[in-house]
Amino acid sequence: MTAPLKAIDGNADLPALMTDLAARARAAARVLALASPEQKNSALDAIAHAIRSHAAAILAANAEDVAEVRAGGATSAFIDRLTLTPARIEAMAEGVTTVRAISDPVGTVTERWQRPNGMTIERVRVPLGVIGVIFESRPNVAADAGVLCLKSGNAVILRGGSDSFRSCRAIHDCLVQGLREAGLPEAAITLVPTRDRAAVGLLLSGLNGGIDVIVPRGGKSLVARVEAEARVPVFAHLEGVNHVYVDRTAKLDMAKSILLNAKMRRTGVCGAAETLLVDRAGAATSLQPLVSMLIDAGCEVRGDATVQKIDARVKPATDEDWDTEYLDAIIAARVVDGLDEAIAHIHDHGSHHTDAIVTEDAGSAEKFLNEVDSAIVLHNASTQFADGGEFGFGAEIGIATGKFHARGPVGAEQLTTFKYRVRGNGQTRP
C-alpha cells in the first residue's frame, strides 16, 4: 500500500499533492465499487469500535480546537457546533452502527422490463465515484460522510474547517483503522492533510476529473462559493431559514413543546427554527404564551408590531431578520392572516430547507404539506427532525435543498446513481 499523505504547510506544492490525493481516491473507488456488502459492513463495525475505543483521543484533540477558537473570540453557537462530548461521540458511533444495518444500495435493481424483441433491460444502482465533501466546524460530519460514502461504494475526500482540523484528524484515524482491518484501501476515505484554504479551490476545480460531485456543508458563504466556483456537480445545501407556523386550531401545549424544541434543542444546527409565524385568528390565546416561553428559555425574540405589543422584551424585527439563519438563540416572530399568508411568507423568505405547521385541522395540514416547496415539510413535529439519522438513514452527508438527483437528507441511497444493463440473445437494430 502506498505511503500515507503527510500534513503540509502552505509553502508545499499543494496542487501536486491534491492531484495525487484524487488519483489515490479514484483508484480506491474502483475497488470499493466492487466490494461486497459483508466487507463494507466489516469495515463499519471496525470503525464504530475504533470511535468508541479512541474517544479519549478524539476528546483531547477537540479540546485543543475548542480552546483555540474560544481564544479567538468565537461565538457560543459556533463553539457548540465544534464541541464534542462523550455523548456526541457515542452518538457518532451509534450512527455508524445504524448505517451498517441499512440495506446496501449498490447493485439494487430498481426496475426491470422486457422489450418486444426479447431484450431484457434493468436499471441498477451504482456508486457515484469520488465525492468531495467540504464542511465547516462540526467534526462529526467527517464520520457521517465517511461511513455513508463507504456504505454506498464511493471514495470520499473530506475537507473539514480549519477550526476542527485536530478533531477531524482524530476521527479520520478511526475511519482509516476500520478500512485497514477490513482489507479495503485507506484512500477510500481521505482527509485533506492541510489547513491551507487553497485546497478548497483545488477541490472545486475537479482535480482533472478526479472528483465526480461536491457536497458543501456549512454556512451561506461557503455554499455560495462552492456553487460559484465548482466545475463538477454540486449537492447544494443552502441555509436553514426554517419556519414554524402555529395555526388557529393548534393545541397550545403541543405548539409550545414543538416550538421550544425546534428553536432551542440545538440552536446551531441547520434544522433549527428561525422564524415563528402565528395565525392572527388564534393569536389572542397563543401568541403571548409562545413568545414568553421562548424569552424565558433564553431566546431573543425579534417581532413585528403585533408581537412587540404583547411582551416588552421583544425587540423590533428588521426586513433582514425574515431572511436570516441565526444559528443562535434568536428567532423572528410575525403574526399572519391565516394559512395562505403563512405559505406566502415562507415562499418569499424561506430557503426550501425545512418548515412545519402545528394544527389540528387536517385540511390545513395537507395544504401546507402540498404547497410549501421545501425539501422537508412537517405536520405537528419539530423542525429538528431534519436529520438523516432521524429519517432512518443512519447519518447524512447534508440536507440537499436543490431539486436535482437528491433532495432532503442525503444518505447512502442518495449517494448512488444508476446504469442500465441490457441482456440480449443476438438482437440487432433494424
Image (cartoon, rainbow, N blue to C red):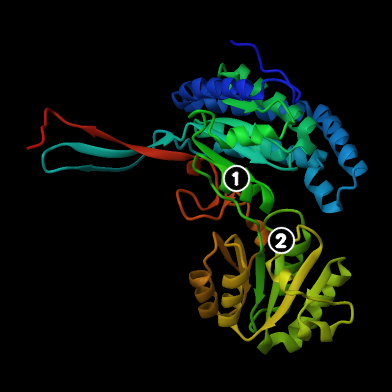
What is the three-letter code of the residue carrying label 2? Glu
Lateral position of residue 213 relative to residue 121, left or right: right
What is the three-letter code of the residue carrying label 1? Val
Kindly identify the residue that appears in the image at 82 percent across and 62 percent down.
Answer: 329
Closer to the eye: label 1 or 2: 1
The image shows residue 113 at horizontal and vertical percentages of 23, 43
Identify the residue under disc 2: 325
Q: Is mark 2 on a helix, strand or loop?
A: loop
Lateral position of residue 222 relative to residue 373, left or right: right
Q: How crowded is mark 2: few (under 14 residues within 10 Å), some or many (20 or more)?
A: many
Residue 193 vertical position relative to residue 216 in the rendered view, above or below: above
Identify the residue under disc 1: 226
Q: Is mark 1 on a helix, strand or loop?
A: helix
- Given residues 245 and 206, the one toward you in this image is 206
The image shows residue 65 at horizontal and vertical percentages of 84, 36
Residue 203 vertical position relative to residue 321 in the rendered view, above or below: above
- Given residues 409 and 195, the one toward you in this image is 195
Q: Distance between the Cα atoms at labels 1 and 2?
A: 19 Å
The image shows residue 114 at horizontal and vertical percentages of 19, 42
Q: Is any atom of residue 396 visible in this view?
A: no
